[in-house]
Amino acid sequence: MSELEKYEKLRLHIKQQVTDIEKSLDSLGIAEKLAKQMELIFLDQMLDKMKQLDDEE
């Protein structure tokens, strides 16, 4: 598997995690929601950084 394929697989995995978290937020308590929202922020930052790296190439 090439580096590009690994990179794209990682990107898809992150996007799937974001989707899964967003779908589960309604059924969580406040503390769990806060933790999941913090995780979403982190994952969104990772996706933004990956996009920046793509744009530089």
Image (cartoon, helix red, strand yellow):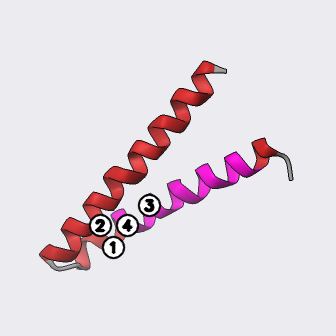
The residues tagged by marks 3 and 1 sit, at their Cα atoms, a distance apart of 9 Å
Type of residue at label 1? Answer: Ser
- Please give the range of residues in magenta: 6-22
- Binning the other alpha carbons within 10 Å of mark 2 as few (below 14), some (14 to 19) or many (20 upward) gives some
Instruction: Verify CB contact (< 8 Å) between mark 4 and mark 2.
Output: yes
Q: Is mark 4 on a helix, strand or loop?
A: helix
Q: Which residue is drawn at 19% across and 66% down?
A: 34
Residue occupied by mark 1: 24
The image quarter containing residue 57 is: top right
CA–CA distance between discs 1 and 4?
5 Å
Three-letter residue code for mark 2: Lys
The one of 7 and 16 positioned closer to us in this rendering: 7
Residue 7 locus on image (x, y percent): 69, 46
What secondary structure is the stretch in magenta mostly built from?
A: helix
Q: Where is residue 26 in the image (x, y as percent from the top left)?
A: 23, 72
Contact, CB < 8 Å: mark 1 with mark 4? Answer: yes
